[in-house]
Image (cartoon, grey):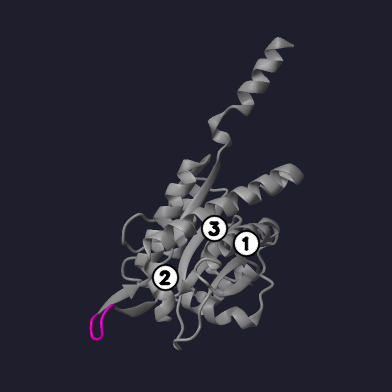
């Protein structure tokens, strides 16, 4: 009996129980993602690239998760090219429980603004195709992969946890960042992103805001904004884990 108890407590104290989170800064290297000019004077500007903001935010999220009981990793920690397939390979290698991809939105018009959160769903809505095209643009053999994703049963399974995970994180972003910085809440949406599909695990994609909107870009570039955003993502993940560990452990 005593031996059983000992084994039991040993099992529950194993450090391997910490969840493995893979944070994916979108783009990198020759794939710059979206670009915008940031004016800090009448004629003075500098070029802002999505890949740099995504990396900066991802590192902050990584640090926040490190303060908590998570094993967190980055798909890239420097400015380098990483294909979508390579990102998925990393997820497999480290046996990630969750995959969080960080992006910044852009539009040809100046007005669009706000934050949105996508979760992988292969029963997709055509209205969200536009964003997906931007994030998916570096892929070869596109049609083949789309067909594969649409019929992938693994995705059907991961949607069950991807959606509530997206909702938990999005809601914390709204509370901690959205209200303070007066950001427009564009909602939680289903999306067909290859990078999410290829990872074959619960995955979400964060669009932090629009770098094509100069007022919003100024907020996103702010260090305090980024720190708050990272904290919100970590708290949202905590919320999800607490909620689902109580009700349905299988969702983890
Ligand atoms: Zn992107």
Nearer-N-terminus badge (3/1): 1
Residue on which the image places disc 1: 171
Q: Magenta stretch: residue 86 in it?
A: no
The answer to whether any part of residue 157 appears in the image is: yes
Q: Between residues 122 and 185, which one lies in front from this camera angle?
A: 185
Quarter that holds the N terminus? top right
Residue 245 quadrant = top right
**Tag 1: Cα neighbours inside 10 Å, few (<14), some, or many (≥20)?**
many
| Front label number (3 vs 1) | 1
Q: Quadrant of ligand 1?
A: bottom left
Magenta range is 40-44
Nearer-N-terminus badge (2/3): 3
Nearer-N-terminus badge (2/1): 1
Residue found 58% across the figure and 67% down from its top: 117
Q: Residue furthest bottom?
A: 109
Q: Position of residue 238 (x, y in %)?
A: 60, 48
Q: Position of residue 80 (x, y in %)?
A: 32, 62
Q: Residue furthest left?
A: 44
Q: Position of residue 178 (x, y in %)?
A: 54, 67
Q: Which mark is residue 46?
A: none
Q: Main secondary structure of the magenta part?
A: loop
Residue found 53% across the figure and 48% down from its top: 96
Q: Residue furthest top?
A: 2
Q: Which element is circle 3 on?
A: helix
Q: CA gap, disc 2 to disc 3?
A: 31 Å
Residue on which the image places disc 2: 219
Q: Which mark is residue 199?
A: 3
């Amino acid at each position: 009996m005593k031996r059983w108890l000992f084994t039991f407590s040993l099992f529950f104290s194993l450090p391997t129980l910490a969840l493995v989170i893979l944070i994916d800064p979108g783009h990198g290297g020759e794939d710059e993602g979206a670009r915008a000019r940031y004016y800090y004077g009448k004629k003075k500007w500098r070029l802002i690239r999505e890949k740099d903001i995504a990396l900066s935010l991802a590192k902050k999220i990584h640090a926040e998760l490190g303060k908590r009981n998570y094993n967190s990793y980055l798909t890239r920690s420097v400015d380098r090219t990483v294909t979508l397939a390579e990102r998925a390979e990393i997820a497999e290698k480290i046996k990630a429980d969750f995959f969080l991809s960080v992006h910044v939105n852009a539009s040809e018009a100046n007005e669009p603004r706000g934050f949105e959160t996508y979760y992988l769903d292969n029963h997709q809505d055509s209205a969200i195709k536009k964003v997906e095209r931007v994030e998916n643009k570096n892929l070869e053999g596109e049609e083949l992969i789309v067909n594969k994703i649409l019929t992938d049963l693994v995705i059907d399974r991961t949607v069950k946890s991807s959606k509530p995970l997206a909702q938990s994180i999005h809601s914390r972003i709204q509370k901690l960042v959205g209200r303070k910085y007066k950001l427009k809440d564009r909602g939680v949406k289903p999306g067909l992103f290859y990078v999410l599909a290829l990872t074959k695990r619960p995955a979400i994609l964060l669009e932090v805001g629009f770098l094509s909107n100069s007022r919003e870009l100024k907020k996103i570039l702010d260090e305090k904004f980024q720190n708050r955003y990272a904290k919100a993502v970590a708290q949202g993940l905590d919320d999800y884990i607490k909620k689902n560990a109580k009700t349905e452990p299988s969702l983890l």
